[in-house]
């Protein structure tokens, strides 16, 4: 029995939605779902390849199928006086998103203009390379400048120990190398809007995903590259992200932050000292609410905990510190310290 056009299109769409999770067994996976023959599924795959929607690699036995973006855009922009992020978005980028839902467009608009503007104002470079790919299920945007490098610039501006210390400060928010013209909120909020947010510069990559992670790179990255990815099925909105970091919804203000404790660690060192705590707590008195994320932290020292949960609150009563993702031993130590306040 032949399939209707609607049924054939449904099968092709199913393949496109699932091919990234099943690059080597998409034939079997689709065959099991629709109870069709292997030659029939292969015919659909070759049709999708002919339509330039997927790529087929390898021989019959080791064949691999990969999704190709429906829309690809790459452009190099020269940093000069008349270069403006809103104009670039309006004339070059926005038309690419004509078939994307409004909440995703709003997030990509915010992220693109914030990061592109940072490259114009802060990079001290001469060019910005923009790359955008839109697939059936997600969007990836990359903004890459050839400037001095964001971590290096922050380190020098604030006289910090090294680039990894600059990343810790950047993760807190309200950090900018030019406070007269920037609030330092753009990167913080952008990193929370996307499913994956990566800043690569020098020998480090800072990744915000399910948890903030710092990676050391194999080679030196000249300038700064920011990569942003979000699912087209996401129901996240710019408003929902802003509201997570505002305590009083009646009075707009960036007064809450979440800081990953693991960024205070150098290598595999233990987290035990007051100096580590002070580095973690630097500038946090600017916030009304601070949430410390203890994900991937197995233990902390008593001096470290005392500085955070007794000394700091006593000295800064207008800032409240909470812990999240702490294990039982850390939670017990925090409770014990707080009893002595």
Image (cartoon, rainbow, N blue to C red):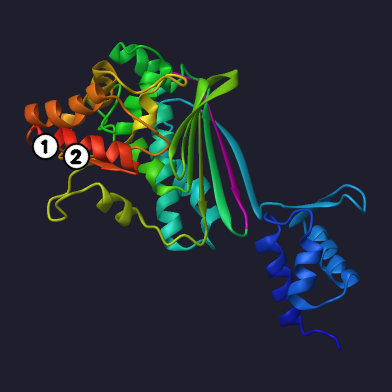
Q: Which class describes the residues within 10 Å of circle 2: few (<14), some (14-19), or many (20+)?
A: few
Q: Are marks 1 and 2 in contact (CB under 8 Å)?
A: yes
Q: Judging from the image, what secondary structure is the residue with disc 1 in?
A: helix
**For the point 28% across and 28% down, which residue is it?**
175
- Judge whether 68 appears above or below 166 on screen: below
| Label 1 Cα neighbours within 10 Å, binned few <14 / some 14-19 / many ≥20 | few
Q: Splitting the image into 4 quarters, where does residue 296 fall? A: top left
Using residue 280 as the reference point, say whether residue 192 is left or right of it: right
**Image quarter in which the N terminus is found:** bottom right
- Horizontal side, residue 307 vs residue 210: left or right: left
Residue linked to disc 1 = 339
Q: Which residues are magenta?
A: 124-135
Q: Secondary structure at mark 2?
A: helix
Asked if residue 58 can be seen in this view, the reply is yes
Q: Is residue 74 magenta?
A: no
Tell me the distance, in whole angstroms, between the alpha carbons under discs 1 and 2. Answer: 6 Å
């Amino acid at each position: 029995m032949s399939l209707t056009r609607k049924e054939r299109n449904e099968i092709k769409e199913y393949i496109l939605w699932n091919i990234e999770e099943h690059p080597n067994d998409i034939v079997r996976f689709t065959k099991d779902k629709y109870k069709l023959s292997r030659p029939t599924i292969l015919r659909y795959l070759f049709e999708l390849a002919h339509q330039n929607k997927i790529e087929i690699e390898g021989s019959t036995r080791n064949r691999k199928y990969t999704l190709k973006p429906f829309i690809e855009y790459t452009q190099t922009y020269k940093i000069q006086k008349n270069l403006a992020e809103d104009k670039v978005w309006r004339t070059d980028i926005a038309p690419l998103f004509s078939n994307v839902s409004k909440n995703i467009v709003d997030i990509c608009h915010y992220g693109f203009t914030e990061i592109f503007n940072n490259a114009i104002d802060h990079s001290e470079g001469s060019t910005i390379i923009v790359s955008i790919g839109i697939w059936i299920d997600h969007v990836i945007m990359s903004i890459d400048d050839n400037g001095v490098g964001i971590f290096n610039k922050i380190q020098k501006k604030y006289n910090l120990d090294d680039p990894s210390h600059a990343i810790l400060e950047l993760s807190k928010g309200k950090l900018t190398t030019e406070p007269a013209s920037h609030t330092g909120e753009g990167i913080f909020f952008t990193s929370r809007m996307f499913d994956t947010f990566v800043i690569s510069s020098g020998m480090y990559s800072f990744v915000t995903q399910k948890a903030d992670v710092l990676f050391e790179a194999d080679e030196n990255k000249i300038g700064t590259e920011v990569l942003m990815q979000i699912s087209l099925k996401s129901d996240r909105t710019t408003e929902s992200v802003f509201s997570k970091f505002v305590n009083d919804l009646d009075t707009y203000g960036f007064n809450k932050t979440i800081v990953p404790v693991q960024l205070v660690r150098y290598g595999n060192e233990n987290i035990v000292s007051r100096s580590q705590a002070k580095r973690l707590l630097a500038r946090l008195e600017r916030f009304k609410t601070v949430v410390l994320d203890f994900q991937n932290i197995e233990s902390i020292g008593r001096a470290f905990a005392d500085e955070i949960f007794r000394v700091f609150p006593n000295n800064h009563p207008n800032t409240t510190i909470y812990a999240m993702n702490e294990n039982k031993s850390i939670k017990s130590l925090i409770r014990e310290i707080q009893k002595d306040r």
